[in-house]
Amino acid sequence: MATKYETVIGLEVHIELATESKIFCSCSAKFGGEQNDHVCPACCGMPGMLPVVNKHVVDLGMTAGMMLNCDINRVTTFDKKSYYYPDLPGSYQTTQWFSPVAVNGTVRINTSKGEKDIRIKQIHMEEDAGKLVHDDWTNTTFVDFNRTSVPLIEIVSQPDLSSAEEVVAYLERLRSLLRFAKVSECRMEQGSMRCDVNLSVRPEGSNVLGVRTEMKNMNSISAIERAIEYETARHIDAIENGTEELVQETRRWDDIKGKSFAMRNKETAGDYRYFPDPNVMPVCIDDEWFDGIKASLPEFPEVKKDKYITELGLGEYDADLLTESRALCDVFEEAYAECGMAKEAANWIISNCMKVLNRKQLTADMLDINGKALGQLIKLVADGKVGNANARKILDEMFENDIEPEKYAEENGFIVSNDTSKIQDVINAVVAADQKSVADFKSGKEKALMALFGKCMKELKGNCDPQILREMLLKTIQ
Amino acid sequence: MELYITKNEKATGKIIALDDMILTKDYPTAAGSKMLDGYMSLFNAEVVDRLTNGGYSIGGKAKVGELCIDLLGETSYFGAIERNDGTLITASSEIVKIGEALAAIGLDANGTSRRAAALNGQICVKPTYGTVSRFGTISIACSGEAVSVTANTVDAVKEVLDVIVGHDDKDGTSLSEEKCALLKSNAEFSPAKKIAIAKSITDSAEDSVKSKIEEVKSVLEANGIEVCEIDDSVLSVAKSAWNILMSAELCNNVSRYDGVKYGYRTPNYTTIDELYTNSRTEAFGELLKTAILFGSETLSTDNYMKMYDKGLRIRRIIVEKFAEIFESFDAVLLPASAKNAYTKADTDANKYIAYDENLYTAPASITGLPAVVAGGVQFIGKAFSENTLLDIASKLEGVGK
Amino acid sequence: MDREILRRLEKLNQLQLTEQEKEAFLAFYAKQENEMDVLNSINTDETERMVHVMPILTVVREDKVIKKYSREDLQKGAPETTEGYWQVPRLVE
């Protein structure tokens, strides 16, 4: 009988933190920008600047730790790791080697085989490296330090994962939790979430680990799936058929060729010579700081979803959509608190707000409107004070400015008028001017009524209860 | 002999000479190395801004040995300073000595500033770690280096120290304004009553140095200060421990000089490794190379625990030993060097002589404690006791010259 | 320490010593090793390492962007740049 094998996988996931500025200097940490525009002498490796830790990095490091059920090290320190590479301007990376911010966590994943807890060894804070652009034409590498010193956390799992499916579930769970806690946007396509895969294969039931290889800097979930499948097969083939000798090494996954390759620069496995950074004082997390972060943690998305369904009566589909993003949940909860109408609030976010976001080419995470104001707007519509079309105009304005919907509606003449004599005047004028539609309607063309209705509504600038208008219009032409 | 690498011909009034380890926007900073020849900083060191804001005039950048880790500037890419009698001296000390500047600002990690002041009969203070911002200095060994002040009189040292002491947000190791104020000349202090001589360290120096210690001792005693010898065997290991920490930190601090972003780049390369290796090999001198390799080795996986980590633990033992001494004494008296003068022959015969001379200068470097040189000898006090040490120094003016 | 370790050490630190420098380094290292023996004869099992000589903690800054330097200024002293990039020989991965 053929031997059965099991794959043993541990992940190191790098996540760029959602801060404004870099970890040790005050340059912008935003993605993009012109090359070498977000840089200063410190992140260009020039002498004389000294590192001062960005407090928000520690906030987010702790938040990530708490979201993943870790113990927080109340005294956490920074260390230097030395190696030469052109994307590393100081020829060292400041990271956490001796006392990382968080240790010993767990992440629960759900796969076709059921629930499983993946143990987290540690989470440490560190600085990112710069970006290299290789040009074969001129045989040159171009160096861009915009990303240098952008804050990262590295989440190191125990080798508890055993399949591509589990890895995908784990990564998606991390992404969901960390986006929810506003730790990071976790956008793999922008490199704000990257993954090193450590993989070995052994006969099922064996307690001896096989030879481990590492694939670095994977940045797409589907590529990770393919790489794991390829690498697993390669290991098994090597073990069974002796096609090659497995060595502990770093490999590069080529997603186009669908193969992994040994990295040419073997000396990178050199000695990193870690030592405590004398310029960065230990960060001591006191109770006040710790409790503040603890109190700011969001409910887990599935807890919220459950609550939305059972307590607020939302459908599963709506609850799913809302809990995709913390920003949507925040606006929804604020709006609901104000107007008391869960379904309406959900509808406004899922349809109207998402439309505006799409138009602006923004993601759901970027929804940044005042939820309380949205609640007020929903109430205005429900009370018949503002028509739907005008309400959408008010919503547009809410994306631009922090307005009070009712005041804004008044100022712009968006309040529904209940002045029936005015409505009748408008109807009379429209009917007089469009006798053809009246005749069409009378000859049985229902559509003609809509044309007249629309003209009246336009004349009234939308400030009319549609039900009243419809009744009065029918009365007039019948 | 040109003492400045760049001189400000327009300097007037109260002139300060800067060791070429202190970054300036208006003058290049080379740190004595071919690697940084012509390097222009985009910003001034905090001390430079404080001095110019305080009405002082920058006299220029004084030549230093490469990264200021040598004995007396002998490894400078721009040439060592030898006096007519063949003795070595640092440029900044000499500039002050001949009256071209009121004071010199240096970066003291390996004791160069203190050593030079002792040999030149000057006053030098290496203040308590964290009281003068290191922002804008070319880092040597961040955990123990300090901006130093050298002048011909105690008053001049005090005056300049008053200007540069203070908290700086840009330096994460900078102490609070409240702590820094303890150093100011108007702060209250108690004059020294009892001083301890570090016996074994003193005994290891040449007779000429020992007799200086004797002379200082008698002057102090004449001033009513009790002076007695103590067992300092623990303090004598500060040298080996600091040599490890200093070299390792230096190795890391100079790894940024790689020919990629600024500074020297070799013309001889086709690959990135050739670019790195040839740039560094061609631009660095032998002492620096040795320090880098030694420092690197103390951090290697195999050696970390018995070398670097050991050094960090020994540091605590030395700090604790000083604390114990300061329970009974107000200062520790010890030489600043083994000899009263050095020539090129000394540094040629032993290129690593500064490593040995750290016997005298490392105890204050590794602990960050304040040290004052006066009368050709050195006093180490407890943290923030600069006023006490300078008060001792004031009793020694004219001694050891 | 031997020549093989020294060779790796040179590579790790991107330096190349001359034959004479190597000899000198090995002698220097041997001397330092002797001093290590003295250090290691001191019992530090109960002594905590001391990285910072001043007992200050948690020096942090607010998360605020400050832009002070232009790319042009930062690249003024650069050996080689193209279109705002620093430039090095093509890396092989």
Image (cartoon, helix red, strand yellow):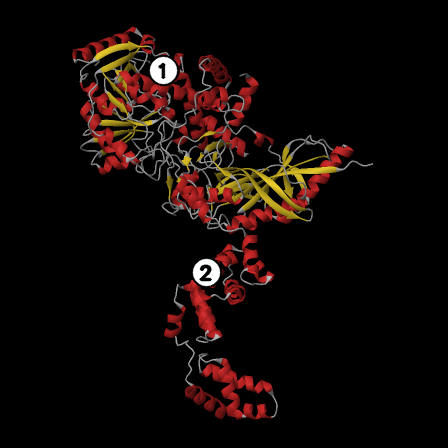
Asked whether, in this view, residue B130 is left or right of residue C3, the answer is: left
* Residue located 59% across and 33% down the image: A265
What secondary structure is marked by label 2? helix
Residue B126 location (% of width, % of height): 29, 24
Q: Indicate the amino acid at tag 1.
A: Leu
Q: Which mark is residue B49?
A: none
Q: Nearer the viewer, residue A20 or A172?
A: A172
Residue C59 location (% of width, % of height): 37, 37
Kindly check if marks 2 and 1 are in contact, taking CB atoms under 8 A apart as contact: no
Q: Nearer the viewer, residue B381 or B395?
A: B381
Q: Nearer the viewer, residue C38 or B239?
A: C38
**Label 1 environment density (alpha carbons within 10 Å; few <14, some 14–19, many ≥20):** many
Q: Indicate the amino acid at tag 2.
A: Glu
Residue A280 location (% of width, % of height): 40, 34
Can residue B77 be seen here? The reply is: no
* Residue located 25% across and 7% down the image: B211
Q: Residue furthest front?
A: A311
Asked whether, in this view, residue A195 is left or right of residue B124, the answer is: right
**Chain letter for the residue marked with disc 1 in the picture:** B
On the image, numbered disc 2 is attached to which residue?
A334
On the image, numbered disc 1 is attached to which residue?
B235
Asked whether, in this view, residue A237 is left or right of residue B179, the answer is: right
* Snapshot quadrant of residue A284: top left
* Residue located 36% across and 15% down the image: B235
